[in-house]
Amino acid sequence: MEYHPVDGSPKAVVWMGIYQNLLCFEGAYIVDHENEMDTPASGQVPPKDALDQAGGAQPPQLPPQGTQTVSGQREVMSRRQFLTYALGGTGALMATMVASPLVVSAFDPLHRASGGAFSKTNWKPSDFNEKLPTHVNYLQHIDDGWNSQDVSNDVYVIVYQKKLMIMSHVCTHLGCHVNGSTENGKSVAPEYGNGKEWFFCPCHGSQYNIYGVQTPASPAPRPLDLYYYHVNADGYVEVGNNFQRSDATWGNNPNPTLA
C-alpha cells in the first residue's frame, strides 16, 4: 500500500517518508518472523509420530510469546508491539523537534533580562556640574518579556564627589513625575521650600533638595532613585538600570569615578 499526500508541502513530504519507512520496517519484520517460525528451536512441538510413541503424552508447553526461552531463544516481538514502539519513537522525535525552539523562546526573556544592557546617550561628563542638576533626555532600552524597545526617558544629573548622580524623575511616594527648578529649559536656583528645595512633586507636595533627598515633612519615603552608568571608549555616558537608596545611604554611589 502506498501513501500519497494531498499536497506537496514539506510537512506532508516528511510524514509520507515516515509512513513509508514504517511499512518497510513492518515488511522486514514479517519476513524475519516467518523465517524464525520455520526454523526448529528448543521447545518446538515434536512430530505426531513421536507423540504416538510416547503413548499420547502431552506436548511440552511453549513459553509465552515475547519472552526469553530457557535455551536462549531470542525474544519474539508481536506485530502490534513493533508498530507501537515504532510509532511511539517517531512521535517522540517529532515532538522534540517541535518543542526545542519553543523552549529556547520561552527562556529567551530571562536571558535578555539578565544582560543588564546600557543605553547610549549623547552626553559627556563635562556637560554636568556640581552646582545644580541638569535635566536631560535619552532613549532607554527596555527588554520587557518578549518585547524589546527603546522608549524616551528623562533624568536629572548632578556631579557629587566626582561621580554623576543620575536621578530618576519618579517621585518615591506614588510615582508622579517631579518638577525641577528650571526656566526655559535651564536650571535655576531652588524655587521650592522657601528657596531651599529644588524638586517638587505636584501630586502630593513632596520636596527634594538638589541631590534628590526628600524633606522630613514630605510624604515621599526615600530619596529619588539613581541610575547605574559607565563612560564608553568614545567618552559618552551610557545609562543602565535604576536602583534605590535610603535616607542613611543617599550619598553612596557605586558608579565609577569620573576621570
Image (spheres, rainbow, N blue to C red):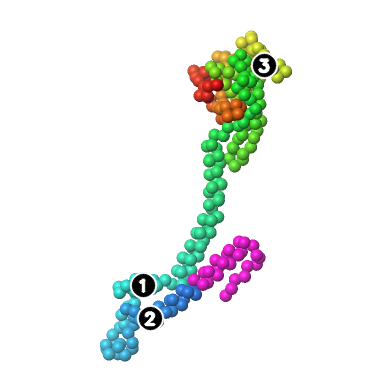
Q: Which residue is mark 2?
A: 39
Q: Is residue 19 magenta?
A: yes
Question: Residue at left 61%, top 10%?
Answer: 196
Mark number displayed over residue 94: none
Q: Main secondary structure of the magenta part?
A: helix
Q: Position of residue 229 (x, y in %)?
A: 56, 27
In the displayed structure, would residue 33 be above or below residue 129? below
In the displayed structure, would residue 206 be above or below residue 229? above
Q: Position of residue 79 (x, y in %)?
A: 46, 72
Kind of residue at disc 2:
Thr
Label 2 crowd (10 A; few <14 / some 14-19 / many >=20): few
In the displayed structure, would residue 222 be above or below residue 38? above
Kind of residue at disc 1:
Arg
Provide the residue span drawn in magenta.
1-25
Residues at marks 3 and 1, CA–CA distance in whole angstroms: 91 Å
Q: What kind of element bears circle 3?
A: strand
Q: Is residue 184 magenta?
A: no
Q: What kind of element bears circle 1?
A: loop
Q: Quadrant of the C terminus?
A: top right
Question: Residue at left 51%, top 59%?
Answer: 93
- Residue 56 image-quadrant placement: bottom left
Q: Nearer the viewer, mark 3 or mark 1?
A: 3
Question: Residue at left 34%, top 74%?
Answer: 73
Which sits in the foreground, 219 or 256? Answer: 256
Residues at marks 2 and 3, CA–CA distance in whole angstroms: 101 Å
Label 3 crowd (10 A; few <14 / some 14-19 / many >=20): some
Q: Which residue is mark 1?
A: 74
* In this picture, residue 71 sits left or right of residue 242: left
Q: Which residue is mark 3?
A: 187
Kind of residue at disc 3:
Ser
In the displayed structure, would residue 75 be above or below residue 214? below
Which sits in the foreground, 212 or 172? Answer: 212
